[in-house]
Image: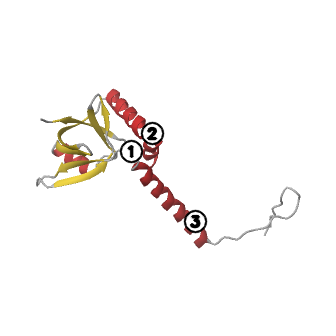
Amino acid sequence: MQQFAAFNARGERAKVVRVSIRRLALIALSALFLLALGTYIAGEQTEVARLRTFDAAGAPHETRMWVADIDGTPYVRIGRVGRGWGEQLKANPNVELIRESGTFPCTASVLSDETVHAAVDDAFAIKYGWVDWWYGVVLRRDAVPVRLDLRP
């Protein structure tokens, strides 16, 4: 069995600190909790709207989300394909956008044009800043832009 020793800059034997696996796990879990809490708080600092979708039975479902406007038209993003509200929106595009200024009936259009996709991503990056980038790293996968056309 070989033994290895660590030495500091002065050539003295370094002090070995023993850390239990339980303590390491607690530190890791605490760091993850603080990261999640910080991400949530940062995400709530700029406008968070609600989108009301309707399931097959017509029952309403509200989801909190970010919204960005391009030339006066609101856009949202489905952060991960297969999300419940995104599937409801695809099945029934008649939705309601709820902002501080009121509730707006809209018709949702899922978009696939790459140019529009880039413009929507840019609008979100401008409005939500580094938090949008961070959410992209942590939560968002293959986001799908959705245009919300206001109905009369």
Q: Residue most toward the right?
A: 11
Residue corresponding to mark 1? 46
The numbered disc on residue 129 is 2
Look at 35% across and 41% down and name the residue there. Answer: 143
Look at 45% across and 39% down and name the residue there. Answer: 129
Q: Residue most toward the front?
A: 101
Callout 2 environment at 10 Å: few (<14), some (14 to 19), or many (20+)?
Answer: few
Q: CA distance from mark 2 to mark 1?
A: 10 Å
Residue corresponding to mark 3? 27
**Residue 144, position in %: x, y?**
31, 39
Q: Given the image, on which type of amino acid does mark 2 rest?
A: Gly
Decide if residue 40 is on the left or right side of residue 13: left
Circle 1: element type: loop
Callout 3 environment at 10 Å: few (<14), some (14 to 19), or many (20+)?
Answer: few
Q: Mark 2 or mark 3, which is nearer the start of the sequence?
A: 3
- In the rendered image, the quadrant that contains the N terminus is bottom right
Camera-side mark, 2 or 1? 1
